[in-house]
């Protein structure tokens, strides 16, 4: 059972997508794991043949528990019953107080046709369905977009209208545990810089002028890519503090905070975010937002985040100061862009300003290094055409 975050203690193997004897390739989705944040598609870490399934569907097991054996051609018969090697995958994404939302009009997302995809249900609802031997496809959900909530599995007399989802307290408990650990163990330092986005906004408006609605970019995509590119020159902010030392990440997997319907946040990672172009970043943000709300997040997205961006979008607050999610060592915050006075060459003029913040681990970096990152981010955003 892999870990999808420092706040994850166990998970429920909801469904196997393979059987004994099946051949699998690295990164194939082989199972669905239910966590307090929803259903995650589990990817296999090696290629080979499934020799044994060790955990039955519906069983809840602790992180680190072997759940299957895969014969990759290296394991011999004499050790076939032993636990297979598991990769040292860093735990993922913070749960900052923010949500990833667009600053400009965003293209629409076409949902799958009726009958396609898995039934949408919360983890607790799935567990209750398994215990009661109830077919979820026959249940009408009362949650957003028809999602089946725990209350939908209970008799009407015990589930009055308006009853909140039963799995939110568990998520809040997990969030509080992880954030308490962060504030207790990590010596945070905080920096803030105001960045003028007017030039970036003007360029973006010109870029979108002749584009069809579905091909337009939003300011948030530009901000995400700028942060990822700025991190290329600040490796001390991109990595993990484990076993008393810092391990720099080889790639930039940018965790991005997305609101969960019904309450809570989840931060799947944009893999190799600095290698994307603006159009690819836009597609990634839309795709992740859709899959957070409708299912289909992959285990790599939940376990490989090396740093996190907490963006308030256009409906948030002026500033956001994040809490680092261990074992990561930094979190970048972007407040809501606002039109405010700006002094340029001694003259006051209007500017679209955003407050960029950094919370970083003082065991790994210091204020001078953090300031260098924020200054570099500012320079990138003054030349958006180069992104």
Image (spheres, grey):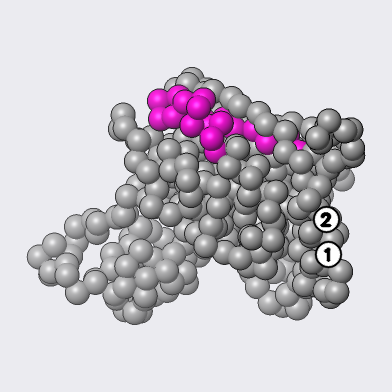
Q: Residues within 10 Å of mark 2 (few under 14, many from 20)?
A: few
The reply to whether dot 2 and dot 1 touch (C-beta < 8 Å) is yes
**Camera-side residue of 376 and 253:** 376
Residue at (44%, 29%) from the top-left corner? 365
Magenta stretch: includes residue 39: no
**Camera-side residue of 221 and 84:** 221
**Camera-side residue of 81 and 320:** 320
Q: Position of residue 227 (x, y in %)?
A: 60, 48
From the viewer's perspective, is residue 243 above or below residue 83? Answer: above
Residue at the spot of label 2: 202
Q: Position of residue 150 (x, y in %)?
A: 70, 49
Residue at (19%, 74%) from the top-left corner? 73
Q: Quadrant location of residue 143? A: bottom right
Q: Position of residue 86 (x, y in %)?
A: 29, 55
Per the rendered image, the range of residues in magenta is: 354-373
Residue 182 seen by the camera = no
Give left or right: position of 162 versus 309: right
Residue at (17%, 67%) from the top-left corner? 75
CA distance separating discs 2 and 1: 6 Å
Q: Position of residue 172 (x, y in %)?
A: 64, 34
Q: Secondary structure at mark 1?
A: helix
Residue at (31%, 32%) from the top-left corner? 245
Q: Residues within 10 Å of mark 1 (few under 14, many from 20)?
A: few
Magenta stretch: includes residue 359: yes
Residue 221 seen by the camera = yes
From the viewer's perspective, is residue 243 above or below residue 92? Answer: above
Q: Secondary structure at mark 2?
A: helix
Residue at the spot of label 1: 206
Question: Which quarter of the figure is the C terminus placed in?
Answer: bottom right
**Camera-side residue of 155 and 203:** 203
Labelled disc at residue 377: none
């Amino acid at each position: 059972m892999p870990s999808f975050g420092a706040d994850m203690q166990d998970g429920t193997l909801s469904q196997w997508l393979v059987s004994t004897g099946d051949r699998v390739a690295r990164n194939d989705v082989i199972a669905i794991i239910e966590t307090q944040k929803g259903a995650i598609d589990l990817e296999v870490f090696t290629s080979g043949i499934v020799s044994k399934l060790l955990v039955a569907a519906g069983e809840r097991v602790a992180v680190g528990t072997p759940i299957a054996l895969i014969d990759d051609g290296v394991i011999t018969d004499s050790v076939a019953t032993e636990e297979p090697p598991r990769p040292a995958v860093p735990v993922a994404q913070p749960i900052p107080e923010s949500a990833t939302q667009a600053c400009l009009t965003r293209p629409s997302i076409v949902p799958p046709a009726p009958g396609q995809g898995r039934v949408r249900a919360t983890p607790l609802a799935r567990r209750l369905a398994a215990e009661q031997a109830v077919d979820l496809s026959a249940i009408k959900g009362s949650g957003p977009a028809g999602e089946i909530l725990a209350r939908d599995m209970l008799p009407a007399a015990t589930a009055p209208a308006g009853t909140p989802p039963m799995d939110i307290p568990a998520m809040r408990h997990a969030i509080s545990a992880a954030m308490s650990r962060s504030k207790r163990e990590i010596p945070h330092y905080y920096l803030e810089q105001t960045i003028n986005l007017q030039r970036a906004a003007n360029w973006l408006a010109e870029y979108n002028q002749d584009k069809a609605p579905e091909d337009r970019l939003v300011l948030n995509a530009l901000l995400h890519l700028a942060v990822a590119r700025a991190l290329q020159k600040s490796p001390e902010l991109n990595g993990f503090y484990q076993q008393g030392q810092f391990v720099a990440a080889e790639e930039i997997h940018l965790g991005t905070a997305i609101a969960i319907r019904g309450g809570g946040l989840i931060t799947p990672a944009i893999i190799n975010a600095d290698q994307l172009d603006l159009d690819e970043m836009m597609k990634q943000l839309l795709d992740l937002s859709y899959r957070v709300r409708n299912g289909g997040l992959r285990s790599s997205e939940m376990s490989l985040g090396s740093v996190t961006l907490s963006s308030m979008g256009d409906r948030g607050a002026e500033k956001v100061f994040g809490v680092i999610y261990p074992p990561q060592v930094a979190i970048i915050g972007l407040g809501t862009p606002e039109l405010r006075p700006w002094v340029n060459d001694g003259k006051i003029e209007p500017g679209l300003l955003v407050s960029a913040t950094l919370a970083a681990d003082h065991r790994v970096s210091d204020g001078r290094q953090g300031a260098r990152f924020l200054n570099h981010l500012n320079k990138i955003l003054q030349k958006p055409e180069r992104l």
